[in-house]
Amino acid sequence: MNAVQDVTETAKRRLAFQKAFSQEHGGWRKKSLIADAKFETAANKEFKKQERRLSKTDSLGDQEGFAPAMSPDALPEDFAAFNLLVTLKEGAISLTKVIRCFENGKVFITHVESRKSLASVQQYQLFLQVVCSHDVFLNVCAEAKQSPLITELKLLEEKEPEKKDVWFPKHISDLDRCTHLITRFEPDLDYTHPGFADKNYRLRRKEIADIAFGYKYGQSIPRVQYSEEENKTWAHVYRNLKNLFPTHACQEHIEVFNLLEKEGGFCEEKIPQLEDVSEFIKRKTGFQLRPVAGLLSARDFLASLAFRTFQCTQYVRHGAKPDHSPEPDCIHELLGHVPMLADPKFAQFAQELGLATLGVSDEEIEKFATLFWFTVEFGLCRQNGEIRAYGAGMLSSYGELENCLSGAPVVKEFDPAVTAVQEYKDDDFQPILFVVDSFDEMMFKMRQYVTSLQRPFDVKYDPYTQSVQVLDSKAALLHALEDIRQDLNILTHAVNRLDNPV
């Protein structure tokens, strides 16, 4: 099996495990990028444990995180958990007898696995995880070793798994591999969804989702023929928000929104096509849109920003509740995110946020997802002595936009270290928001925060090849410096020309 196939198979196993893990822990996916990131951290930890126990080598030796022959002197004195590998003499018929021996010895068995022995097909092995006191464990092991049912008894010590490099996309085409989509509040899965009882709406969602599933890098974004009802929903939201933008939205959003109406196909009557809008913002900042059927994992979504790519839905919220959508729809993306991504400074911030997430731990992804939430989704800024909204979660919701400047939320100064661990609320208007004096200040603070990351390398985006350069060697640094030297030569020549006009 090659590396790509191995990654794909692992992704399939991880997705299947996440579904089972979610059902055991309160339901499939949450309602925000932060909740998804927290879910992924917990699920990935459990998945790694399962992978160590159930590896393809079918071995419970060193490869799977256990080492044999732990000395009894090294055992903890108090009540503890122990891992045992038991080889049986009489094969599968003695399984229940051996397990009963341990249970009779006042040992609590928390996990059992069985398999044919690697040494002999006539023998079976049990992997037991047990909990008991130190003394009880020694007594039970001593009795077990004397049992005619047991050939060998090994105490296994669970080791910390070796840290492996986290895969992340190196080229913009690698985003095609970020397709293990994780839906979170689907109309056919959640009875509280406005479209749960609407069969036609559910079919429509699937139809539009299939477009995104088939999309590959380099293709034009397929066009969606929106229905009269969908355009009516868009018109309702568009009209109400447009009336509020002049007094509540930041100046950058207002300027680009007006430009979108002139050049980008924005109007009240119909939903603009992603391909047309993508071309518009690409001309302004280099950002482009990519269709997605729902919410990607937090890691994959944030990684896309590193390539100036925004994963964008094409479906429309249910018409029964046009002022609220339980998940990001195209109205949220187009009215909230698109105008800000067409602003050069904000686009730079979004890309730097994405670059900072490449290769970091799950715990750090949680923090970056929280930073994304309180800036890109629900950020405030000061302009001309007033506070204005620049977060897409507010700019695409009439209620949120009214509430954010009503005096109801607690407004704090943006500090990445504090913001990254702030608890959030997703089932009502945001009670806590963060404000910045300018996007320049926000970028400066974020750059300072990123220097504290526990990452063994830095990265640099190459816009010519649309790829990420990993700066982990002298050769990589020299290559990056050469690019900077060429840019400096051009700038120096331009300055000299201005100082000495012909």
Image (cartoon, grey):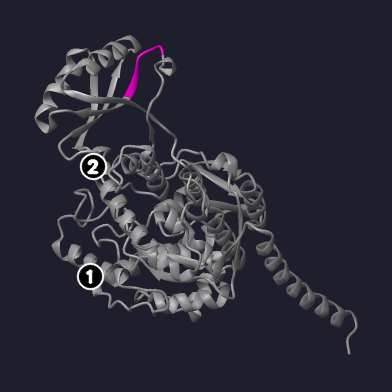
**Which residue is under mark 1?**
207
Residue drawn at the location 9% of the way across and 30% of the way down? 93
* Mark 1 closeness class: few <14, some 14–19, many ≥20 residues within 10 Å: some
Give me the disc on residue 23.
2
Q: Visible in this render: residue 224? A: yes
Give me the disc on residue 231.
none
Is 193 or 9 nearer to us in this picture? 9
| Res 131 → quadrant | top left
Q: Visible in this render: residue 324? A: no
- Asked if residue 451 lies in the magenta stretch, the reply is no
The outermost residue toward the left is 93
* Three-letter amino acid code of the residue under disc 2: Gln
What is the span of residues highlighted in magenta in the rendered image? 77-82
- Relative placement, left or right, of 181 versus 101 is right
Give percent across and percent down for residue 24.
24, 38
* Three-letter amino acid code of the residue under disc 1: Glu
